[in-house]
Amino acid sequence: MAGIFRAAFVAVRQTRRARMVAGALAIAAISACTTGSVLSLEPAVDVGSQTSAVPNYAGMQSLVPSNPYMTAAYPRMDEPMAPTEQMPASEIDCRKELKRLGVVYTDLAPIHEGQCGIDYPVKISAIGSIGMKPAATLTCDMAATFAGWTRNELVPSARWRYFSGVRTIRQGSSYSCRRIAGEGTLSEHGKGNALDIMSIELSNGNDIDVRKPGLFAFRTRGFLNTVRADGCQYFTTVLGPGYNYDHRNHFHFDIKNRKNGYRACR
């Protein structure tokens, strides 16, 4: 009889042990299954700034940039000129002139965009103590011409009219690959030969907007008329407020090469 009870006790103990092992295995299996399910729901693509690789699943819209106005046309990234670039003598001489005029500039790699481009572009950030904001990408010839006008005409006119120097020149467009509005002709901006000036900040704090001044703004009108007229001695094209609607808020200066030395000053 004792043997029977002992055998029964051993059987019960083995049964409990088997149940405990089975329970542990079941818990482990459930944990593994749950972890695998969560991971399988994560997309296998980067959904950050690169959205083109995101598949268009049924019922889901394709991802687009959050601000299309900011991402529609990224600014062109400037590349410095390679140390091995060889410049022609005319470009070397032009850079000597920039240094003589006190122009702060950086040589950039050649720009080629279809019909547009500059073989040996420079990016000017200042003319002496006068800041250029933002920095302007131009041909060296245009940069030197503009620097000469700034030092010889703009600064003396500001001192004569306002008894002040010039602190900052704010430009709206330098190199830009585009055509003349309403025409099929390539703009001088697309060659790096043009610069649009929006306003001029004086050292005394006055900020002179190029837009046509008010009726009684005699000093501002005289100043703008002077710098505009003097520009015709340096540039082959000077356009500004009063010429047409497109130039209502800036001076356009360029050095377009025309037959017979014709200049357009309007």
Image (spheres, rainbow, N blue to C red):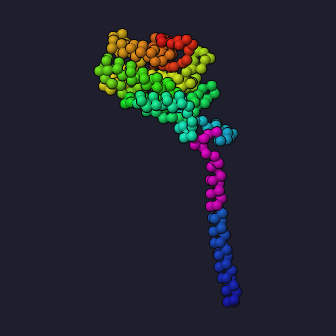
Does any portion of residue 134 appear in the rendered image? no
| Residue 75: quarter of image | top right
Closer to the camera in the image, 52 or 254: 254
Q: How many marks?
A: 0
Query: Residue 48, relative to residue 100: is it above or below?
Result: below
- Residue occupying image coordinates x 53% and y 38%: 80
Quadrant (top left/top right/bottom left/bottom right) for the N terminus: bottom right
Does any portion of residue 111 appear in the rendered image? yes
- Residue occupying image coordinates x 58% and y 23%: 178
Residue 70, image x and y in percent?
53, 32
Residue 211 included in the magenta stretch of the image: no
Residue 16, image x and y in percent?
65, 75
Going by the picture, which residue comes out furthest to the front?
A: 89
Closer to the camera in the image, 112 or 54: 112
Going by the picture, which residue comes out furthest to the bottom?
A: 2
| Residue 159: quarter of image | top left
- Residue occupying image coordinates x 66% and y 63%: 29
Closer to the camera in the image, 163 or 48: 163
Residue 158, image x and y in percent?
34, 20
Range of residues picked out in magenta? 31-52
Query: Residue 28, relative to residue 199: is it above or below?
Result: below
Going by the picture, which residue comes out furthest to the left?
A: 163
Residue 49 included in the magenta stretch of the image: yes
- Residue occupying image coordinates x 45% and y 15%: 233
Query: Residue 13, relative to residue 27: is it above or below?
Result: below
Residue 109, image x and y in percent?
56, 35
